[in-house]
Amino acid sequence: MKKQPTLFIIISLLVTIPGCQEPNDRLLIGISFETLQTEYWVASVEAIKAECEKHGADYLVAVANGDANRQFEQINNFIARGVDGIVIAPKDSHTIIPIIKAANRAGVPISIYNRVPASMGHDFVSVVADNYEISLSTVRYMAELAKASGRPHKALIMIGDLGDMNAVNRRRGFDDAVAEHHDVIEVVSEVPTEWNQEKALAGVTNALQANPDINFLFSSSDFLFPSVVSALKVADKYHPIGHPDHVILGGFDGDAMAYRMLQEGYLDADGVQDVFYECQLAVQAIMDALNGKSPEEKTMVDPGFVIHQDNLEQRADQMWGSAF
Amino acid sequence: MTKLFTIVKRQGIIGLWLLLILGFSLASESFFTAQNLVNILIQASTLTIIAVGMTFVLLSAGIDLSFGSIMFLAGVAAGMLTTRGVGLGVAVPTILIIGLLFGLLNGLLIVRLRLIPFIVTLATFYMGRGLGLLLSDTRAINLPEAILQIGSSRILGVPVPVWIMILVVLIGHLILSRTVFGRYIYAVGHSKEKAAKAGLPVNRILIGTYAMGGLCAGVGGLVAIAQLGAVSPSFGLQSEFLAIAAAVLGGTSLFGGKGGIFPGTVVGAFTMQTIQNGLVIVNADPYLHQLVTGAVIFLIVWVDSRQNAKKKSLSLN
């Protein structure tokens, strides 16, 4: 008898939790993200939710906190729950394979967001930004500015986690763009950050210590900008565009801080992943699959774009950080 | 190579640190400059402070995996308070109190529920980060200039983060070497059962070590955000592992009862920061950074374990 109030509370909770309501005839989409640790991921999950709502679908959201096994379990739970489709931002390109297999076995269409699976032999659609091309175009734009100044430039790149293909491709894009302009740009420092702000701050400070004449800096992610700004300020090198000691600055992502820095005239160029476009593609692929439409291509690429001082007004709406 | 092993064997971590300084100085003339040595001191300040806290916990034969989450939570609280116009006079003590309370919570859960520290602090690691993410709405918080002043100001020519580090090291070292509480920590770390039989307040000591750890994590978080000027959702991630590595490098045993803050943990933290600094200064291949750091940790722990084994066999003979 003593257990009755507890039982009553549990039943009441189950009835009132939205996820436990009676099924209806609306589509149910499972959204799984490996992490929500940066603004980029938060903006992405919000955009996917908005796309689901646009299609009149309900959604469940699960976050794996960087644990591939947990993500696999969460997907199995989605399938057991009877979702009609899955949009997933996986931990990496290998651990997604068993997840795709599980979705395929259950006949649930699956869209892979932000990463391309290591094996293409299953049914899925992946949506990914062209990390290489976007960083290549961004650094090319920065290099043109360096060239126009008529001065030689010493460059620093902040590299992300070297186990992350996106970080590796961004570095490749930087290297190739700089190689095209080797007459004006010399890379004097490569700072590994492991996507860690404290490490990035120490790394940039040390690089500026070893090479006080660094005047060209590319960050592989905008979320490292607080570290960049802090280190440049301490070295008295944070000046707006037009100042004789301005450091040509570029980044990648399109987040809110990059948008502010562009507006305030400190950031020269930013490679933007078109989050809204990518999320629209990811959800549309599920809807197409449910309507029996086969995808034209298994991997859909977001070409992204470079935003800079000259096109800021025209393209700010497409920069997800401007709305964040 | 043989000479290197001999020096490391004889001098331990201090020898290795001096060797690293010598090596980097020969590799780049930008390394051994007053400005760069100050840089190393500033950059090592956060790690040293949290490693001091971790030393307390490790000496009691415990472990705390929630340091990074405490730093993050403290940072979020600082961001929320200062961006709402609350002065540093209120924000700074609040950060420290959050760290202290979080540490107390860890200690109480471990002692009262008799749970393994690894599991308890793993749980509070998730809880702390989750709470921080919830409060910050998973968005980066840019801090006002007033907080940055703490990170960039100098007193008597010495940067404030370095002063804070010196203060924490001094207090920590004095507690461990000159107080009854400090001696009790070593006793509990050697053997809880024997300490309890001797009438020591084991539970209170354990709670005290985790509270000290939490407080140091809060202070470390404050020093880090004062230099960064922003708190991102990934702030503090994996800091606990760096703190453990620094303490262990400095000779603190993972099994408790052996080690100390000065020079041990301090030199351990400085060694790790010297490696990071030196590799950037000489513009080493980015793939080498983790490899070198891992190799140094392995080398010093290996030498240490060999020396311990030798001492044991000598005492048995």
Image (tube, rainbow, N blue to C red):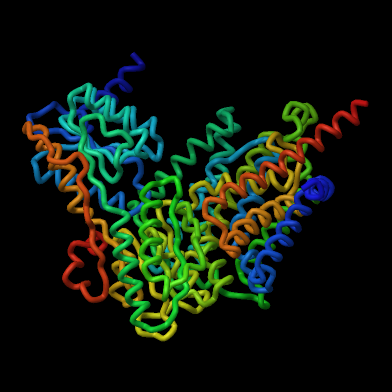
Q: Image point 63% across, 64% down: which residue? A: B40
Q: Is residue A235 left or right of residue B13?
A: left
Q: Where residue B5 sits in the image (x, y, percent)? A: 79, 46
Count the numbered circles shown.
Answer: 0
Whether residue A171 is situated above or below residue A75 in the rendered picture: below
Q: Quick one: B122 or A233, which is closer to the camera? A: A233
Farthest residue toward the top?
A: A1
Q: Quick one: A9 or B119, which is closer to the camera? A: B119
Q: Quick one: B81 or A131, which is closer to the camera? A: A131
| The C terminus of chain A sits in image quarter | bottom left
Q: Image point 93% across, 26% down: which residue? A: B317
Q: Where residue B221 sits in the image (x, y, percent)? A: 53, 56
**Does the image show residue B179?**
no
| The N terminus of chain A sits in image quarter | top left
**Does the image show residue B99?**
yes
Q: In this view, does A300 lie to the left or right of B33?
A: left
